[in-house]
Amino acid sequence: MRKFILGLVVGTFLSISTVVFASETVQTYLFPAFFNINGQNVPLNDKEYAVLNYQGHAYVPVRFIAEQLGAFVEYKDQGTYKDIIINHFPSNVPILKDDKYANIHFGLLDLYLDGGYTGIRGLLALDHDKDSITEHDIEFKLHFYDANDKLIGTASGTSKPGGSDQKQTISMGEIRYVSAGEVGDFSKYAKVNFEVTAYK
């Protein structure tokens, strides 16, 4: 009788463990698919990528799709959490540039007022060029003008992120979310100019 009870307890424990383990897994199927992006067939050649079918829905590789659409994708393993960061220039955001630096672009996403301070959110992109250095520090200024071309304010920004644990440089091909700001109200601007002040 003691062996029977011990066997029953062990069997129950194994059954519960199997159910817990199974609840964290899903069953998917490979899904043969072809991608047609803006009228062009784009092959999924890389053996690392696959399209999966889970409960009647197609799951596509986010990096492959995002990069085909011109976005920059970054994966960060934060331990318990995994961050998938996708930065891209929305079609309604004008791309600003400094003619002296053809490979650097900026997109102004929005600005907000915080008391007497104007905060700016945007995207900074560093395209590939002939430079052999693949990572750079970039500093820039945004000059805001009213409808009469009168300067109403200038905000300074940098490629360096706010957190000290993040990479301090921007890499070739990267699109990075950046913020800037300055004292003053630039919310009624009619035009903005982008100026690169340092490229190291």
Image (cartoon, helix red, strand yellow):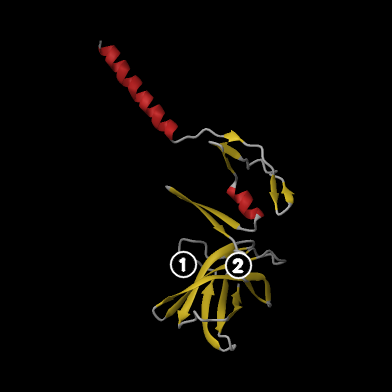
Residue at which label 2 appears: 92
Q: Is residue 39 left or right of residue 187?
A: right
Disc number lying in front (1 or 2)? 2
Dot 1: element: loop
| Placement of 3 over or under 167, stated as above or below | above
Q: Kindly identify the residue that appears in the image at 46 percent across and 61 percent down.
A: 165
Count of marks placed on residues: 2
User: 59 or 178, which is in the foreground?
Assistant: 59
Could you tell me if residue 35 is visible in this image?
Answer: yes
Q: Quadrant of residue 71?
A: bottom right
Kindly identify the amino acid type of the residue bearing the numbered disc 1. Gly
Q: Quadrant of the N terminus?
A: top left
Instruction: Using a 10 Å C-alpha cutoff, classify the residue at mark 1 as few (fewer than 14 neighbours), some (14 to 19) or many (20 or more).
Output: few
Residue 79 in view of the camera: no
| Element on which disc 2 rests | loop
- In percent of width and height, residue 5 lies at 27, 15
**Earlier residue among tags 1 and 2:** 2
Give the image location of residue 61, x and y in percent: 60, 46
Q: Pointer 1: what residue?
A: 162
Horizontal and vertical percent for residue 152?
Answer: 52, 86
